[in-house]
């Protein structure tokens, strides 16, 4: 978990958030979102990379605008990363197979899906919005 947190933070520190609120992932060589290409609508994860990048760089308003659950997810990742690092140093491990972790993960997944469905039906974006102008 520590490596994931450090990796995400390092990448997010060097990316330039796309002002359109999504498409930042393309700086990593990834293609545009297929749902945006096909339907001109955002997928449930559209904007998460931009949101994480804005959160890491301290642009919280832009982070929530890109994806409302993004700052919460990054904060959760940071807490898990720090807790895992403390556990590593002190010689104990966290039991992620316990019910609390499972139900928290399930709740976050469902929240992302609900927000994603809402955004799919209420937002219209074009492929050109993903690129810098």
Image (cartoon, rainbow, N blue to C red):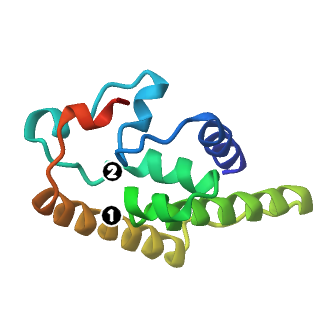
Pinpoint residue 38: horizontal percent, then vertical percent. Answer: 10, 34
The residue identified by callout 2 is 45
- Residue drawn at the location 81% of the way across and 62% of the way down: 87
Seen as rendered, the residue at the extreme right is 90
Seen as rendered, the residue at the extreme bottom is 100
Relative height, residue 129 to residue 86 (above, below): above
The quadrant where residue 132 appears: top left
The answer to whether marks 2 and 1 mark residues whose Cβ atoms lie closer than 8 Å is: yes
Q: Residues within 10 Å of mark 2 (few under 14, many from 20)?
A: some
The residue identified by callout 1 is 112
Task: Identify the mark at residue 54; answer none if there is no mark.
Answer: none
The quadrant where residue 75 appears: bottom right
Pinpoint residue 63: horizontal percent, then vertical percent. Answer: 48, 59
Q: Name the secondary structure under disc 2.
A: loop
Q: Name the secondary structure under disc 1.
A: helix
90 sits to left or right of 125: right
88 sits to left or right of 124: right
71 sits to left or right of 128: right
Pinpoint residue 26: horizontal percent, then vertical percent. Answer: 40, 28
**Distance from the alpha carbon under mark 2 to that under mark 1:** 7 Å
- Residue drawn at the location 52% of the way across and 78% of the way down: 100
Mark with earlier residue (2, 1): 2
Confirm whether residue 67 shows in the render.
no
Query: 103 or 69: which is nearer to us?
Result: 69
Seen as rendered, the residue at the extreme front is 133
Confirm whether residue 75 shows in the render.
yes
Query: 5 or 126: which is nearer to us?
Result: 126
- Residue drawn at the location 35% of the way across and 29% of the way down: 133
Q: Residues within 10 Å of mark 1 (few under 14, many from 20)?
A: some
Query: 66 or 112: which is nearer to us?
Result: 66
């Amino acid at each position: 978990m520590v490596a994931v947190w450090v990796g995400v933070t390092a990448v997010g520190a060097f990316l330039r958030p796309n002002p359109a609120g999504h498409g930042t992932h393309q700086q990593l060589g990834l293609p545009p979102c297929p749902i945006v290409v096909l339907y001109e609508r955002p997928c449930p994860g559209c904007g998460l990379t931009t949101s994480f990048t804005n959160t890491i760089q301290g642009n919280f308003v832009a982070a929530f605008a890109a994806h409302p659950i993004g700052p919460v997810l990054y904060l959760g990742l940071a807490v898990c990363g720090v807790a895992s690092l403390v556990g590593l140093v002190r010689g104990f491990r966290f039991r992620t197979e316990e019910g609390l972790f499972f139900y928290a993960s399930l709740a976050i997944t469902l929240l992302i899906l609900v927000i994603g469905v809402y955004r799919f039906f209420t937002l219209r974006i074009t492929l050109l919005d993903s690129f810098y102008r």
